[in-house]
Image (cartoon, grey):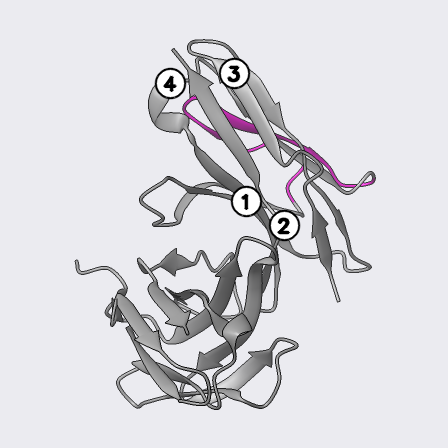
């Protein structure tokens, strides 16, 4: 079974600064999808960004971007110009064949 | 477009009882996945249903079961409740097709407390 590891249980960043959340995964498959989800304190999970493994270009969504290193099985999330509303739990996820597995999450706090 | 709806939002049960949780997916979505979220274990995959068939299953005991109806609504049932079953149960829906990335859209969850 695929495993997803997020090695940073908690992180903090000053408002307007940049922060990078780490994620590694383990799989023997070649075709799969990777995601970052955000769960604010109100707890509704929201998709932040997704990456298809067959695409070499890193995905970008406004202030959110990823650094996808397929050979290293690494999928980090960079948040630029952090805002107070970015405070949340961030989960890295791996999907193949409609089976999505999550990492343990990183609790990010944006400080004013 | 309505989102994923989970009911009930909160419930309290005692050990040994059973519970049924409901999930209505986004209109047109045929896949429903269930997750258990706890502070200690994080998000644990329970099972995924597509067109009334269980397609994927996590590593949970047989006390945890689910089903999906012809309108894609899904229910999950936990029998003989244990204290450790206290958790937030999240449901997510997606198109479920084999092509492309099937983005999961989550509901707000059902918070189960077992006393």
Residue wearing tag 1: A91
Left or right for A10, reference B112: right
Q: Residue at x 63, y 36 (%)?
A: A9
Front one among B44 and B27: B44
Residue B57 sits inside the magenta stretch: no
Marks 2 & 4 on one chain: yes
State if disc 3 and disc 2 touch (CB < 8 Å).
no
Secondary element under disc 3, as helix, strand or loop, is: strand
* Range of residues picked out in magenta: A55-71
The earlier-in-sequence mark between 2 and 4 is 4
Q: Position of residue A13 (x, y in %)?
A: 52, 16
Asked if B97 appears above or below B43 in the picture, the reply is below
Secondary element under disc 2, as helix, strand or loop, is: loop
3D distance between C-alphas at marks 1 and 4? 18 Å
Secondary element under disc 4, as helix, strand or loop, is: loop
Secondary element under disc 1, as helix, strand or loop, is: strand
Residue wearing tag 3: A13
Residue wearing tag 4: A83
Q: Quadrant of residue B90?
A: bottom left
Residue wearing tag 2: A103
One can see residue A98 in this view: no
One can see residue A109 in this view: yes
Tag nearer the camera, 3 or 1: 3
3D distance between C-alphas at marks 4 and 3? 9 Å
Left or right for B81, reference B13: right
């Amino acid at each position: 079974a695929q495993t997803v590891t997020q090695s940073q249980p908690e992180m903090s960043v000053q408002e307007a600064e940049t922060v990078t959340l780490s994620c590694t995964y383990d799989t023997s498959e070649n075709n799969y999808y990777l995601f970052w989800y955000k769960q604010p304190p109100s707890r509704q999970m929201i998709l932040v960004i997704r990456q298809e493994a067959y695409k070499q270009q890193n995905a970008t969504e406004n202030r959110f971007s990823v650094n996808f290193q397929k050979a290293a099985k690494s999928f980090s999330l960079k948040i630029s110009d952090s805002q107070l509303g970015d405070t949340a739990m961030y989960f890295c996820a791996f999907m193949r064949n409609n089976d999505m597995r999550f990492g343990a999450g990183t609790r990010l706090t944006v400080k004013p | 477009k309505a989102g994923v709806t989970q009911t009930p939002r909160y419930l309290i049960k005692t050990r040994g009882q059973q519970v049924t949780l409901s999930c209505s997916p986004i209109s047109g979505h045929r896949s429903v996945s269930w997750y258990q979220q706890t502070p200690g274990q994080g998000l644990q995959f329970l099972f995924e249903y597509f067109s009334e068939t269980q397609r994927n299953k996590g590593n949970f005991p047989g006390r945890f079961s689910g089903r999906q109806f012809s309108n894609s609504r899904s229910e999950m049932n936990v029998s003989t409740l244990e204290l450790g079953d206290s958790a937030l149960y999240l449901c997510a829906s997606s198109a479920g097709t084999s092509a492309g990335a099937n983005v999961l859209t989550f509901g707000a969850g059902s918070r189960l407390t077992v006393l």
